[in-house]
Amino acid sequence: MATFSIIILNWNGCSHLQTFLPSVVKSDHPDFEIILADNASTDESVKWVRTHYPDVRVLSFDENYGYCKGNNLAAKSANGDFLIFLNNDVKVDKSWLQPLKNVFDRFPKTAAVQPKLLSYRQPNYFEYAGAAGGMLDRLGFPYCRGRTFLGVERDEGQYDDYPEKIFWASGAALCIRKTLFEEIGGFDERFEFHMEEIDLCWRLQRLGYEIRVAPDAVVWHLGGGSLHRDDPRKLYYNFRNNLIMLTKNYDTTPLPLLLFVRSLTDGAIALSFLLRGLPSHWKNIAKAYRDFFSKLPYWLEERGRGNSEL
């Protein structure tokens, strides 16, 4: 049995695979397998991988199931004790796997670990999507160690001293115990895109587990492969899914108060987009709120529950 099952979800990403997969194959850990979970690509992705890397196990799905369902399906076929969900646009250091295992060994309550995410375009800087580990503020807005608003810090070893507890591990490179992933029901497929990893990590913490970063496990993420950070559709998923996630998991502040305060802050953000001449951004935030509140009774019923088993 492989210690690590590295699952790379792909849809028409042959050029990414050609650039980034070779580094993953060269990982120097003795026990790992690589699974390409292909979401019905129409390019040469599957053919190229089978030709150049026949040891990579290919799962060819009959349609594009998106991030959550595609990874959930692939996890069922994984043989490893630890699952790594790795984007197809991530380059890895050859020695990245053992530091992940070391964190699990050192901290038995750890459920998931994130490597240090640096930018592929600017290798000395953190990458926006995960940096040195994800956090959540009191209003439920996600941020990262090594990222301030839209800016990222230069990596000067400021977060390298200790495998700190974090709130969430980036879905660009997320390592999790397979038993816990199965127990908790995997990614919530209703999220479709974005924040599903935060919801997953939050549910694990509600069960008493910890999420940590492994600063000596280093990867470089290109980013923007599915939806660019400025894409109006990304705003829709981020705002809608954030509200769903808070309704499912938040138990510190009374939910009505939290949703009221968030509606004020999010309304101000939407208005700023409108004043800046970006009506599509405003519309997608409004749509996110409409779709969330139209199913609020349903999400209230989900409050505090886990997902069904895989």
Image (tube, grey):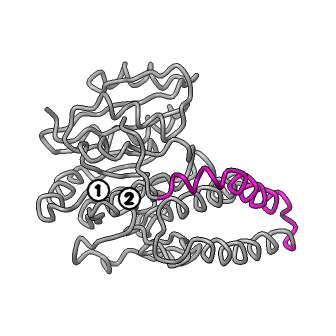
Q: Where is residue 131, by image quadrant?
A: bottom left
Per the picture, the main secondary structure of the magenta-coloured stretch is helix
* Residue bearing the label numbered 1: 112
Label 1: element kind: strand
Residue 290 on the magenta span: yes
Q: What residue type is labelled 2?
A: Cys
Residue 282 in the image: state x and y as whole percent.
80, 63
Q: Do the residues labelled 1 and 2 touch (CB within 8 Å)?
A: yes
Image x and y of residue 283, in percent: 82, 58
Image side of residue 245 versus residue 260, left or right: left
Task: Give the CA distance from mark 1 to mark 2.
Answer: 8 Å
Q: Is residue 260 left or right of residue 47?
A: right
Residue assigned mark 2: 201
| Amino acid type, label 1 | Ala
Question: Would you say residue 264 sits in the magenta stretch?
Answer: no
Q: In this view, does 85 lie above or below 292?
A: above
In the drawing, does residue 144 fall left or right of residue 178?
right
Q: Which residue is drawn at 24% across and 48% down?
A: 177
Q: Give the range drawn in magenta.
A: 275-303
Q: Nearer the viewer, residue 236 or 294?
A: 294
Q: Position of residue 173 (x, y in %)?
A: 37, 52
The front one of 125 and 181 is 181
